[in-house]
Image (spheres, rainbow, N blue to C red):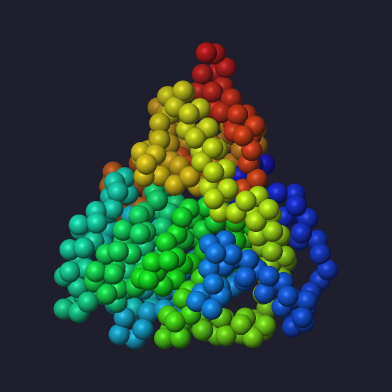
Amino acid sequence: MLLMNPGPVTLTERVRHSLLQPDLCHRENEFFDLQDEVRSGLLTVYALHPSEWAAALITGSGTAAVESMITSLLPAAGRVLIIINGVYGERIQNICERYQIPAAALSFDYLKPLSLDAIRARLQTGFTEQRFSHVAVIHHETTIGRLNDLRAIADLCGEYGAQLLVDAVSSFGAEQICFEHSCLSAVACTANKCLHGVPGVSFVIARRAVVAKALCRTYYLDLVRLIGAQDRRNTPFTPAVHAYYALAETLREFAEEGGREARHRRYTALADQVKRGLSLLGINATIPESQSSVVLRSYNLPEEISYSVLHARLKAVGFIIYAGQASPGFSTGSSSNALRFFRISTMGSIESTDISRFLRHIEELIYGGRS
Ligand SMILES: *Cc1c(COP(=O)(O)O)cnc(C)c1O
């Protein structure tokens, strides 16, 4: 089965085999060597210096990393502006509500680019007559495949004295991230999207200076304790050891294949192949390519076929595609509209020949093999 859903991804055989290594006690040096390798490998993906940045490994899915970042890095007097243009932005809003973190949401039409003017105006207004200390945003909104302009948002943060917290769960490893921007405080990420690892490990990469001022509101997801213990070659809890083995292997594979830029090029070629092939069949992208990531794209479902039929037929020949995601904030209204598009991710062990086969199957489904 080939997974074209946005994580977990199809594994390479090399990564799958990496799971079959000796059992490790997480209190032994062998485990800490593995943990050290993974933590430094993650910083290497964006050439970050360990004196300035720290990677905190968390046993949990991507949402655990987002929750750890949000609940640890907002100080007691913090106020966060959450930029929402998809379900993952809504998730950050839900996290803030759950922990009663002072927050305001600024929502945008999922189908249109963010309005920097609207963000500026909201930062100008502030929150209950005070300035926002932070802005939270999703880098790649997987809901529709939109790549938000991090640098422009970080620049706005600079103008208004705010720090930026980023959900980069579905972009880390493939898209550019402006770590050099002084307003960027932290990013939350996962092993089983653009890095091609197995589910079970996520991570936050945070500026050490910011971690020093953290206020941790949760027990398990306490970023200060996680980083402190991991810096001392320790771990507070039982980690997903086998998922660490896989993450270490994916990072080796990633480096050997040429790193972040090579992964971006690889995804670009595959996404272009999908887009060209589908457009020949009259299936068009939901948003313009210039606004899309290379990781995942949304396509408008042709009139001739329902999502459930398309999904089932493709599954029968070995491909898992992903439905559109409904949301109360979705501009086009009712949740049934979400079923008028579908998503294709190019993450994981997917080759150009797989895409060609996939396109031939869709052509057969729609045109019955004629044409
Ligand atoms: C996948 C994803 C998440 C988290 O998903 P988990 O199911 O918790 O791993 C968060 N944000 C974005 C943008 C995502 O694509």
Question: Splitting the image into 4 quarters, where does residue 289 fall?
Answer: top left
Q: Position of residue 110 (x, y in %)?
A: 32, 49
Question: Splitting the image into 4 quarters, where does residue 120 fall?
Answer: bottom left
Question: For the point 77% across and 82% down, which residue is it?
Answer: 28
Question: For the point 48% across and 53% down, which residue is it?
Answer: 175
Q: Is residue 307 above or below residue 208?
A: above
Q: Is residue 250 visible?
A: no
Q: Is residue 104 above or below residue 330?
A: below
Residue at the extreme right: 22
Judge from the rendering whether residue 17 lies leftward or rightward of residue 162; answer left or right: right
Question: For the point 73% across and 75% down, which residue is it?
Answer: 33
In front: 263, or 352?
Answer: 263
Q: Is residue 337 above or below residue 306?
A: below
Q: Position of residue 277 (x, y in %)?
A: 51, 27
Judge from the rendering whether residue 273 lies leftward or rightward of residue 32; answer left or right: left
Q: Is residue 355 visible?
A: yes
Question: For the point 24% across and 56% down, which residue is it?
Answer: 116
Q: Is residue 259 above or below residue 182?
A: above
Q: Position of residue 92 (x, y in %)?
A: 39, 67
Count numbered badges in the picture.
Answer: 0
In front: 215, or 303?
Answer: 215
Q: Position of residue 35 (x, y in %)?
A: 68, 73
Quadrant of the drawing holding the N terminus: top right
Residue at the extreme top: 371
Judge from the rendering whether residue 332 lies leftward or rightward of residue 47; answer left or right: left
